[in-house]
Image (cartoon, rainbow, N blue to C red):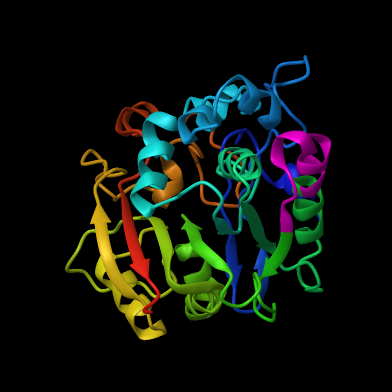
């Protein structure tokens, strides 16, 4: 079987997964886990930045340990505004579900390490025989953290999957994050489990932050989310059934240019920029101009609370 790095061609900034009910099929992955595009000199550590000035969230986002390609996406992902909307505070305990290559980990881990907080990374479940590539993904993520431990601090890697256990100690988390993965879990039949595992990890009054590609309202929701888009009302209903209360919505990550009718689903848009169906070779003659002009997808940003 091809490695995850062979499966993906030309995708340097993003990762996506397709997980059928029969098993995990890696459909996309972020490159740059080995530090592609990073400066060759030793980056500033969270500790050294903190000595110069308090490590604010803004300082963590500006940290030069982040790859330039990742920082270029801040205009679409708005990490400071998004995390502030979810209520991230110094010293909190945070759980990040399926961190992938670590786009948000590069912000969360240094910030929490420098402020006395704790990050749990609920990555892929690696003991599934039908998915031999999951171990490769998690090992690469672990190496990334270990290589710059002074920057990232002590991140605890747990797992989320069909038969995984707790993502963090029960009732320990102030904030749990679902970052553009609901469509993957819908395809896998895991979306209800994700919400229940998040609820179990959170303290009473704790927050679940959700960012997801947003489908047009009023249509019948594809339960497998084959095009990568999910209706906001559907997410709110699933969260409510799991025991959460909707505490707020934001248009921080909205993109009204996104028509949501792209030939290869949301992955036609940047940063993935598919030019052929997933799993097929790239089409050299495909014109990306229209889709690059749209930019990244229209996304819902939701805040749910575990009742006290």
Could you tell whether 167 is left or right of 252 in the image? right
Position of the C terminus by quadrant: bottom left
Place residue 32 in its image quadrant: top right
Q: Residue at x 46, y 30 (%)?
A: 58
Confirm whether residue 231 shows in the render: yes
Q: Residue at x 28, y 59 (%)?
A: 215
Picture layout, residue 163 above or below residue 26: below
Q: Position of residue 171 (x, y in %)?
A: 56, 76
Picture layout, residue 213 above or below residue 21: above
Q: Residue at x 45, y 50 (%)?
A: 88
Label tally: 0
Confirm whether residue 227 shows in the render: no
* Magenta span dominant secondary structure: helix
Residue 244 magenta: no
Place residue 5 in its image quadrant: top right
Could you tell whether 120 is left or right of 248 in the image? right
For the record, the magenta segment spans 142-156
Place residue 253 in its image quadrant: top left
Q: Nearer the viewer, residue 44 or 240?
A: 44
The residue most toward the left is: 218
Q: Residue at x 23, y 38 (%)?
A: 257
Could you tell whether 235 is left or right of 136 in the image? left
Residue 149 magenta: yes
Could you tell whether 298 is left or right of 287 in the image? left
Q: Position of residue 298 (x, y in %)?
A: 30, 46
Q: Position of residue 301 (x, y in %)?
A: 33, 54
Q: Position of residue 294 (x, y in %)?
A: 30, 33
């Amino acid at each position: 079987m091809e490695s995850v790095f062979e499966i993906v061609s030309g995708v340097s900034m993003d990762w996506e997964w397709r997980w059928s009910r029969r098993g995990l099929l890696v459909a996309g992955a972020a490159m740059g886990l080995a530090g592609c595009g990073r400066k060759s000199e030793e980056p500033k550590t969270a500790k050294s930045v903190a000595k110069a000035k308090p490590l604010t969230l803004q300082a963590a986002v500006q940290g030069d340990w982040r790859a330039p390609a990742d920082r270029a996406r801040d205009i679409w992902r708005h990490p400071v505004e998004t995390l502030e909307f979810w209520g991230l505070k110094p010293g909190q305990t945070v759980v990040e579900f399926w961190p992938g290559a670590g786009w948000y980990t590069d912000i969360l881990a240094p910030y929490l390490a420098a402020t006395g907080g704790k990050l749990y990374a609920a990555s892929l479940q690696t003991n599934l025989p039908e998915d031999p590539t999951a171990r490769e993904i998690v090992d690469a993520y672990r190496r990334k953290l270990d290589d710059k431990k002074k920057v990232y601090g002590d991140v605890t890697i747990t797992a989320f999957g069909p038969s995984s256990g707790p993502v963090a100690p029960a009732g320990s988390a102030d904030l749990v994050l679902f970052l553009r993965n609901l469509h993957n879990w819908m395809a896998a039949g895991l979306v209800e489990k994700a919400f229940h595992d998040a609820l179990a990890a959170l303290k009473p009054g704790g927050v679940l932050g959700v960012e997801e590609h947003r489908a047009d309202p009023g249509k019948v929701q594809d339960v497998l989310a084959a095009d990568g888009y999910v209706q906001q009302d559907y997410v709110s209903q699933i969260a409510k059934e799991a025991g959460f209360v909707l505490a707020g919505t934001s248009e921080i990550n909205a993109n009204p240019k996104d028509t949501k009718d792209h030939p290869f689903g949301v992955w036609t848009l940047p940063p993935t920029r598919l030019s052929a169906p997933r799993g097929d070779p790239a089409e050299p003659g495909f014109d990306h101009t229209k889709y690059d002009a749209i930019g990244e997808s229209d996304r819902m940003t939701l805040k749910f609370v575990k009742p006290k």
